[in-house]
Image (tube, rainbow, N blue to C red):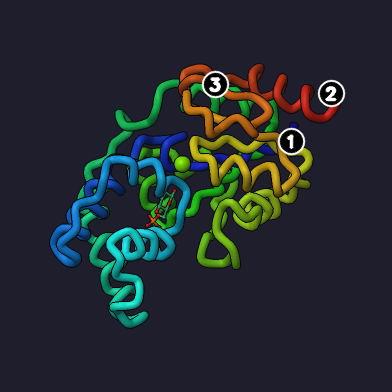
């Protein structure tokens, strides 16, 4: 294991609730539609524009708006979201993550962020973790969002490590699929059945340790 590729939302910090709050408000105010709670997990790992299009589809409004209008909605959602995440501090780092980053660095493992979020650098800055990572893959630079492997391949390229030598960590089904498609070892975080394609699943971030990641890597590459 030479590199670890981190998803951000739901792995490093719990922002899914803020995404959902912002999408719900946008949907209510601009589309006059109430989003069911299930959308919170349905949109995990899905890019901003793809999320917007899924919401329009749910509302039966997908053909109603021009590309420019759809982009404006997505931008309005981002402004609501930015308002929430501007309050993030070090206290919002999920349990076990700081320790894991220290352990990995001490073992010479390179660390890269593979998030679909264009707000990743801002969030890491807020959490005081920006310096801990060797790279942050830019989702604007990749052609296909998760479950396509692109962002994980880009994150591995950024640290000059073959994806096969990397472990990826994800809380979303689309993300686990993306890690596997990139040829890396997948560690899932969470308790839902939809992570079962991962090589190893842990219940929550406090269970993520160097030893667990190393074991997952050995299991896939030698088993
Ligand atoms: C992912 C989130 O990490 O980033 C998705 O799980 C989100 O819910 C996506 O839509 C894009 O985020 P952003 O911050 O660029 O709108
Ligand atoms: Mg996530």
Left or right of 214, for residue 117: left
Return the residue at label 3: 202
Instruction: Identify which residue, 106 or 187, lies in the foreground.
Output: 187
| Residue 171: image location, x then y, percent | 49, 35
Return the residue at label 1: 2
The mark nearer the N terminus, 3 or 2, is 3
Which numbered disc covers residue 91?
Answer: none
Secondary structure of residue under mark 3: strand
Secondary structure of residue under mark 1: loop
Marks 3 and 2 close (CB-CB < 8 Å): no
Instruction: Identify which residue, 172 or 192, lies in the foreground.
Output: 192
Quadrant hosting residue 223: top right
Secondary structure of residue under mark 2: loop
Quadrant hosting residue 129: top left
Quadrant hosting residue 56: bottom left
The residues bearing labels 3 and 2 have C-alpha atoms spaced at a distance of: 19 Å
| Residue 209: image location, x then y, percent | 58, 19
Identify the residue at image location x=64%, y=57%: 150
| Residue 48: image location, x then y, percent | 39, 60
Identify the residue at image location x=26%, y=60%: 77
Extreme residue toward the front, this view = 60
């Amino acid at each position: 294991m030479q590199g670890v590729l981190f998803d951000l939302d739901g792995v490093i910090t719990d922002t899914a609730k803020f995404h959902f709050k912002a999408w719900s408000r946008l949907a209510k105010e601009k589309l006059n539609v109430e989003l069911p709670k299930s959308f919170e997990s349905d949109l995990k790992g899905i890019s901003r524009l793809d999320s917007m299009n899924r919401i329009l589809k749910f509302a039966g409004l997908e053909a109603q708006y021009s590309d420019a209008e759809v982009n404006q909605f997505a931008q309005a959602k981002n402004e609501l979201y930015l308002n929430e995440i501007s309050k993030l501090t070090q206290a919002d780092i999920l349990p076990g993550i700081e320790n894991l980053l220290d352990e990995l660095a001490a073992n010479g493992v390179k660390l890269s962020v593979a998030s679909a979020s264009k707000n990743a650098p801002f969030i890491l800055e807020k959490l005081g973790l920006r310096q801990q990572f060797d790279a942050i893959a830019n989702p604007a630079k990749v052609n296909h969002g998760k479950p396509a492997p692109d962002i994980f391949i880009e994150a591995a390229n950024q640290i000059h490590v073959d994806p096969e030598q990397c472990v990826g960590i994800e809380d979303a089904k689309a993300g686990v699929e993306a890690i596997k498609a990139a040829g890396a070892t997948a560690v899932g975080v969470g308790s839902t059945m939809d992570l079962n394609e991962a090589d190893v699943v842990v219940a929550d971030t406090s269970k993520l340790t160097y030893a667990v990641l190393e074991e997952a890597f050995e299991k896939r590459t030698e088993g």
